């Protein structure tokens, strides 16, 4: 797909990865309908890329706002790229998460992208070539202690992407799934950062993740897993999960300490 003529709906556009993606898309010449709750960080980009960014202030936890986004996007001529990048993380053991927190993660990470996609499939299929990009996580293939609810939502998004890709195989729409590893964003709590440091985990910059997502879109790569050794852990988890069990168990005391 050539992004110079793309008309994009991007959710989570004011967040770390989303903001970097918004700028990367504009540099490619795309026109972006940027969805965000907090639009201040987007206003500078809107001034820099005049005429390329239209902002929708919306809270994807609100069904009325979800419908508003669908209605506005449905009016975009030639809409051919939907990027579901909005999401929320939560490092906490399950017994320290409230029903409200669990609902929020499921709503934003699963219900919102599914609802937006469902509402825009007909619009996207009206052009000769369109793509849906779901930004998931390495934790969508690797269950990790302390991220129980987050993992569940990203497993769901990965399954949704796979099933939808097969469902739309005879359409003009291609479905891509991109799974970043840890990323340097404000979404990571101090406890999550402390755990990453103790485990020696690396975190990528939002700009690097955005660059890889852009490459995946251009190449039409169905599944992209970012980072090593995380890609190796995903493979190991599918073949020899007991080894991953043992590895995670070594960190359980620290996870319980930080995740409370």
Image (tube, rainbow, N blue to C red):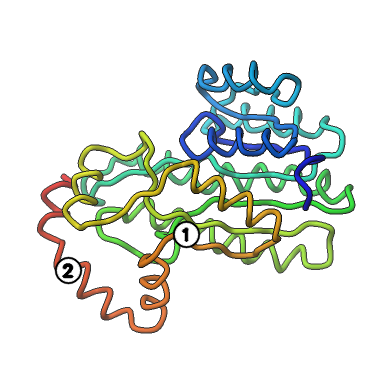
Give the residue displayed 42% in from the left and 43% down from the top: 205
Residue 149, percent from left and from top: 36, 52
Q: Secondary structure at mark 2?
A: helix
User: Given contact means CB atoms under 8 Å apart, are the residues at marks 2 and 1 in contact?
Assistant: no
Judge the density around disc 1: few (<14), some (14-19), many (≥20) Cα neighbours within 10 Å: many
Q: Is residue 236 above or below residue 1?
A: below
The numbered disc on residue 226 is 1
Q: Residue at position x 25%, y 54% from top?
A: 146
What residue lies at 41% left-to-right and 78% top-to-bottom?
A: 238
Q: Position of residue 110 (x, y in %)?
A: 53, 49
Asked whether, in this view, residue 7 is left or right of residue 225, the answer is right
Return the residue nearer the eye: 180 or 82. Answer: 180
Q: Viewer-nearest of labels 2 and 1?
A: 1
Distance from label 2 to label 1 (Cα)?
A: 24 Å
Task: Name the residue located 58 percent from the left edge and 39 percent from the top edge.
Answer: 21
Left or right? Give the position of 33 relative to 125. Answer: left
Q: Which residue ends up furthest to the bottom in the rendered image?
A: 239
Instruction: Name the residue tied to disc 2.
Output: 249
Residue 175: image quadrant is bottom right
Q: Quadrant of residue 119?
A: top right
- Pick the residue in front: 218 or 192: 218
Between 202 and 73, the one lying in front of the other is: 202
Provide residue 219's location: percent of width, then percent of height.
70, 60
Q: Which mark is residue 18?
A: none
Quadrant of the rendered image containing residue 120: top right
Query: In this image, 92 relative to 70: left or right?
Result: left
Task: Identify the mark nearer the N-term, 2 or 1.
Answer: 1
- Circle 2 crowding by C-alpha within 10 Å: few under 14, some 14–19, many from 20: some
Position of the C terminus, as image quadrant, is top left
Question: Circle 1 — which element?
Answer: loop
* Count of numbered badges drawn on the protein: 2
Q: Is residue 130 above or below residue 158?
A: above
């Amino acid at each position: 797909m050539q992004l110079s003529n793309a008309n994009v709906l991007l959710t989570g556009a004011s967040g770390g990865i989303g903001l970097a993606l918004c700028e990367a898309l504009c540099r490619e010449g795309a026109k972006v309908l940027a969805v965000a709750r907090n639009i201040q960080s987007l206003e500078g980009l809107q001034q820099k890329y005049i005429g390329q960014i239209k902002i929708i202030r919306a809270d994807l936890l609100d069904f009325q706002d979800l419908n508003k986004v669908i209605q506005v996007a449905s009016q975009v001529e030639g809409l051919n790229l939907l990027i579901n990048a909005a999401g929320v993380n939560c490092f906490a053991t399950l017994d320290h998460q409230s029903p409200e927190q669990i609902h929020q993660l499921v709503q934003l990470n699963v219900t919102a992208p599914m609802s937006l996609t469902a509402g825009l499939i007909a619009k996207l299929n009206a052009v000769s070539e369109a793509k849906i990009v779901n930004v998931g996580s390495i934790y969508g293939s690797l269950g990790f202690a302390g991220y129980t609810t987050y993992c569940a939502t990203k497993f769901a998004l990965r399954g949704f992407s796979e099933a939808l890709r097969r469902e739309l195989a005879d359409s003009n729409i291609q479905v891509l799934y991109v799974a970043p590893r840890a990323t340097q964003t404000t979404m990571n709590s101090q406890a999550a950062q402390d755990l990453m440091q103790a485990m020696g985990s690396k975190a990528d910059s939002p700009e690097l993740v955005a660059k890889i997502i852009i490459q995946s879109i251009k190449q039409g790569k169905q599944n992209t897993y970012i980072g090593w050794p995380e890609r190796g852990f995903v493979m190991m988890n599918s073949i020899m999960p007991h080894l991953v069990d043992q590895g995670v168990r070594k960190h359980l005391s620290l996870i319980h300490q930080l995740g409370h």
